[in-house]
Each structure stands twice: as C-alpha cells, then as structure tokens.
Image: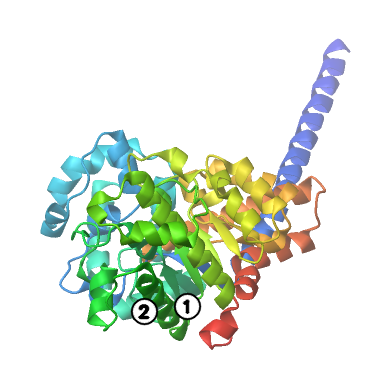
C-alpha cells in the first residue's frame, strides 16, 4: 500500500515536471517568436546605409588580396593591437605568406574572440563565404584567402553579388582620405562631402606639408591650379563656395565632420573680422589657440552654408577608432552651442556617442534638428548598443534614427549590417514583449531606421535623381 502510494506520488510528480518543462519550452519559443518574426522582416528591407568608407576600383589596382588585407583595414586589427600585437604592415600582408602571418597574429586573433569587432567581422565571412567555423583558424584563414583572392580578381562581379546578398540599396561614401574627390560609382554609392580638410586648412596656409595634405588635398594648390589663388580669407571662402557647388553638381547628399580625431568638438563662434585678421598672419606666427579659432570660424561657415543649400551635416561623436587618442575630444555635449545657434541646420550625430550614450540620446530628444545614427555602435559593443538603443527609444521619436556600416571592405560591411539587424530586432522584440509597443509599430520602427528615415531626411530621390 505504502509502495503503491509512493509510486503514484512519484508518477504524479513526474507528470508535473514534464508539464512544466513543456510549458517552459513553449514559453521560450513564444518569447523568441517576436524576435524571429522581426528579424526575418528586417532582413527583407532594402537598406539605405548612411555611412561607409568603401574604396573605389582604381584604388585596388595592382594590389593582391588575402584575409590579412581585409583584416588590416578592419576594426578588428585594433583589438589585436590592444591585445599586444604589432599593427599589420602592408609589406608583410602583400607578401602573402599566410604561415608567417598566422604565426605573428594568430594568437592575438584568438585573444579577441570575445569582442564585437571579432564577431561582426566573422559574421561577414559566414554570410558571404559560407564559413562554418565558430572562430577563425589557421586552416580557415588559408581557405578564405584563396576565395578572397579569386573574388577580388573579378571585383565588379564580386561587388554585385555581395551587395545583392547583403540587401543594400545604396551606401553613403565618405572618402576621408580623398576629401575633394567626386568621381565615385553611383551604382552603389551616394556622395558625401567630407569637410575635414576644408576646415583644417584655414590654419595651415603657406606651410601645409605633404603629411598634412597630399597634393590632391592641398586646397591652396588646388585653388592655384583652378585659377583662383588664395591670398585672403575672402579668397578662401570664395573657393570653398566653388567646392560646395562642385559637390552639389555631383549629387552630394550630406556633409561629414570627423574632426574629433584631431581636435575637440567645441567649435566656438568666431566673428568674421577676427578670422580675417588671423588668416592674414603668416602661418608660422599663428598660435595653437588661433589655429583653433580659424577652424572654428570655418566650421560655423560650413554650417551656415549647409543651411543655404539644404544639406545635413554628419558629425563623429564618441569612441575613436584605432589605438590611442583623446576620447574627451568627441563628447557629444560639446556640440550643444551649435544646436542652439543653428536651429535651421540638420545635424546627424554618429556612433551613439559611446560611451556617452545617455548624453547623445538627450541631445536627440531636446533638439528637433538633431538626428541619431547608430552607425558602428553595434560593432564597438553589441551589448552597449542593445542597452543604448533601448534607452534611446524611451526618449527619442523614431523618425530620427539611421543605420550605417562604417567599413572599408564589403565583407565587414555585411557583418556590420547583420549585427545592426540583430540589435534592432532584439531591442524591438524586448519592447513588444514588455508591452511597450505592438509588433506592427516595431516593424515600422525598423523600416524607418534602415530605410525610410534616410530617404526622407537626406532627400535621396531629389538629390540622386533616381527612384528608390
């Protein structure tokens, strides 16, 4: 009797355990269902990628390509350096000795297996090359190198396949290494006018070295060649006007300021008369504060010009790529005075302002003319992107967000897009599950971030003379 009773109790307990396990599995599936549906939907959106550094075909001329060619131009390289590796040198990469390269860098790749830089770089190869390994191995790198060399020997065909596979409609091209070039492949790219050199050069007159600006970036030599020698500030501004018109004639969609890599984002208002006097002085006699004042004046001039021609201004804020810099230079709140002074300008802040994501979000909430681009943030830290974007959605209307990749090779851009899609889907699914929005609204948010906000804010159909 006792044994029978115990058996019955055990059997009842066993049934309860099975039932609870089934409910848990069902709950887990139900919990993941919004994410899966949203992730699948986001994968169908033709993406307007608002920021890239992809190189043009002519820049590949005579180059060999292997895994390390792409690694050397990726964000992941800086994690290797952070782990203790020496920077990848082009001479060693171009020699293509994969055994030697793995011997020097393999252990540092392994040390970086935990980072978002590593993960998004890996995902690009999973999508485009069918890589099945959970990590990069010596054997996988050798196999990938063969495929990379083959793909880049037929670069145009490869690019077509990769762009189509990724789902990019168009990518904004910022040529920070060639600020004044307007000759780009309009099939894939929209032209961005990077104004770094235009702003910096006000303080470099008559003493600009090759390191500061090569021949085709030396605005004084360019102006001389074009028959517009620069002697006064008025001459400089007149030539700047011509550069703006040149970019407008080539359907530029926005301006870009990434000056935080070399100076602070606090751009003070400098009156024209003061700038005119400073510009007239020999460059060798201008102090560092006076150089900053000239640059500050020029950026304010560029903002005023952006209002006149209706171009948004993208601004790098937050984390600085590479190894070693002055992080405080790029704090988003340093731009507050500009937002107050120029309510008719359109400012697009980059990178979530990481690590000042809260300040960045607050600026987007406070100012109707300040927009937020989460470009690169998921690659810097996927988890920071999830937390930060969730917080941003609490405060900022969703017609003010964009997404970009910010990479040099299509393989990394594809990995960046996969990371961006995952982060947005995860955040939106979480908000759906918590009852903060419906799934229908979540889909609209995703569509706005990856496509429609950019079409509207940058007036792409009007500027690019094409239908989207």
Of residue 209 and residue 185, the one placed in the foreground of this image is: 209
> Would you say residue 404 is visible in this rendering?
no
Where does the image place residue 196, in percent across and percent down from the top left? 38, 61
- Specify the quadrant of the image occupied by residue 19: top right
The crowding category of the residue bearing disc 2, from other C-alpha atoms within 10 Å (few below 14, some 14 to 19, many at least 20), is some
Residue at 19 percent across and 59 percent down: it is 209
Write down the residue under mark 2.
182
Where does the image place residue 61, in percent across and percent down from the top left? 19, 74
Of residue 115 and residue 367, the one placed in the foreground of this image is: 367
Give the left or right position of residue 101, taking residue 425 as reference: left
How many numbered circles are shown? 2
- Specify the quadrant of the image occupied by residue 142: bottom left
Tell me the number on the disc at residue 54.
Answer: none
Give the left or right position of residue 32, taking residue 290 as reference: right
- Specify the quadrant of the image occupied by residue 369: bottom right
> Which quarter of the image is occupied by the N terminus?
top right
Of residue 169 and residue 220, the one placed in the foreground of this image is: 220
Residue at 60 percent across and 78 percent down: it is 459
Where does the image place residue 290, in percent across and percent down from the top left? 37, 49
The crowding category of the residue bearing disc 1, from other C-alpha atoms within 10 Å (few below 14, some 14 to 19, many at least 20), is many
Write down the residue under mark 1.
252
> Which quarter of the image is occupied by the C terminus?
bottom right
Give the left or right position of residue 194, taking residue 95 as reference: right
Element at label 1: loop
């Amino acid at each position: 009797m006792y044994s029978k009773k115990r058996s019955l109790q055990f059997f009842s307990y066993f049934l309860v355990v099975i039932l609870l396990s089934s409910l848990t599995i069902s709950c887990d599936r139900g919990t993941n269902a919004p994410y899966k549906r949203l992730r699948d939907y986001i994968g169908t959106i033709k993406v307007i990628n608002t920021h890239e550094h992809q190189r043009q075909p002519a820049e590949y001329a005579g180059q060999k390509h292997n895994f390390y060619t792409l690694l050397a131009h990726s964000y992941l390289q800086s994690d290797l350096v952070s782990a203790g590796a020496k920077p990848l040198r082009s001479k060693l990469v171009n020699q293509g000795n994969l055994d030697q390269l793995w011997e020097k860098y393999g252990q540092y790749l392994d040390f970086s297996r935990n980072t978002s830089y590593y993960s998004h770089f890996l995902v690009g190869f999973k999508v485009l090359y069918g890589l099945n390994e959970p990590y990069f191995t010596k054997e996988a790198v050798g196999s990938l190198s063969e495929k990379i060399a083959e793909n880049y020997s037929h670069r145009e065909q490869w690019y077509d396949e990769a762009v189509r596979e990724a789902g990019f409609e168009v990518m904004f091209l910022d040529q920070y290494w060639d600020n004044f070039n307007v000759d780009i492949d309009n099939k894939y790219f929209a032209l961005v006018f990077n104004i770094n050199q235009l702003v910096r050069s006000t303080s470099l007159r008559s003493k600009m070295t090759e390191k500061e600006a090569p021949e085709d970036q030396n605005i004084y030599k360019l102006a001389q060649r074009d028959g517009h020698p620069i002697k006064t500030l008025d001459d400089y501004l007149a030539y700047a006007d011509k550069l703006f018109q040149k970019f407008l004639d080539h359907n530029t969609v926005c301006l870009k300021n990434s000056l935080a890599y070399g100076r602070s984002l606090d751009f003070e208002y400098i009156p024209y008369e003061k700038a005119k006097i400073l510009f007239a002085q020999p460059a060798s006699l201008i102090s560092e504060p006076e150089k900053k004042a000239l640059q500050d004046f020029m950026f304010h001039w560029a903002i005023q010009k952006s209002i006149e021609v209706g171009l948004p201004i993208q601004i790098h804020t937050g984390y600085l790529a590479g190894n070693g810099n002055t992080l405080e230079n790029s704090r988003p709140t340093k731009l507050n005075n500009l937002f107050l002074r120029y309510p008719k300008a359109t400012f697009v802040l980059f990178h979530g302002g990481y690590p000042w994501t809260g300040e960045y979000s607050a600026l987007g909430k406070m100012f109707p003319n300040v927009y937020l681009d989460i470009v690169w943030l998921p690659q810097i830290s996927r988890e920071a992107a999830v937390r930060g974007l969730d917080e941003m959605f609490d405060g900022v209307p969703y017609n003010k967000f964009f997404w970009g990749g910010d990479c040099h090779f299509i393989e990394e851009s594809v990995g960046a897009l996969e990371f961006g899609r995952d982060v947005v889907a995860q955040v939106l699914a979480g908000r759906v599950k918590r009852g903060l929005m419906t799934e229908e609204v979540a889909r609209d948010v995703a569509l706005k971030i990856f496509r429609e906000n950019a079409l509207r804010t940058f007036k792409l159909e009007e500027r690019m003379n094409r239908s989207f």
